[in-house]
Image (cartoon, rainbow, N blue to C red):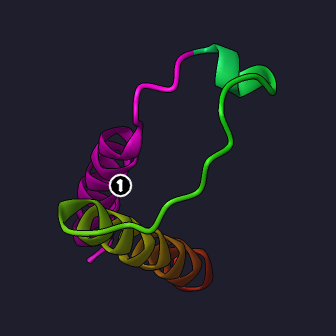
């Protein structure tokens, strides 16, 4: 059972990293230090799907981590 939790957590973590990296819009390193444009637009199409999937994966990762904490 513990092996299944380990494998599930690794798979969810890898998918979460992939979805977060797909969200990057090429803003560059300057935006990380306060530079760059701060224009907010609505998410549409695939961008909205990736955003929603990343939220769901992060909630699954958190729930799985909490479950492992209390069970094992």
- Relative horizontal placement of residue 31, taking residue 20 as reference (left or right): right
State whether residue 14 is above or below residue 67.
Answer: above
**Foreground: 34 or 7?**
34
**In magenta segment, residue 49:** no
Is residue 8 depicted above or below 21 in this figure?
Answer: below
Magenta stretch bounds: 1-28
Q: Please, what secondary structure does the residue beneath circle 1 have?
A: helix
Q: Position of residue 5 (x, y in %)?
A: 31, 70
Q: Position of residue 2 (x, y in %)?
A: 33, 70
Q: Nearer the viewer, residue 5 or 60?
A: 60
**Outermost residue toward the top?**
29
| Quadrant housing the N terminus | bottom left
Q: Look at 79% across and 21% down and name the residue there.
A: 33
Residue 15: within the magenta?
yes
Residue position for label 1: 16
From the image, give the main secondary structure of the stretch colored magenta.
helix
Q: Where in the figure is residue 58, as x and y percent of width and height?
A: 46, 68
Query: Which residue occupies 67% across, 15% down?
Result: 30
| Left or right, residue 69 beside residue 60 | right
Observer-nearest residue: 55 or 1? Answer: 55
In the displayed structure, 31 sits above or below 62; it is above
Report the residue at 51% width, 26% height from top. 27
Q: Name which residue lies at 19% across and 68% down.
A: 45
């Amino acid at each position: 059972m513990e092996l299944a939790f380990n494998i599930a957590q690794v798979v969810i973590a890898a998918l979460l990293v992939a979805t977060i990296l797909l969200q990057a819009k090429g803003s560059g390193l300057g935006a990380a230090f306060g530079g760059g444009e701060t224009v907010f637009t609505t998410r549409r199409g695939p961008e909205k799907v990736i955003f929603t999937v990343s939220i769901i994966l992060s909630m699954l990762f958190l729930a799985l981590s909490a479950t492992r904490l209390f069970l094992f």
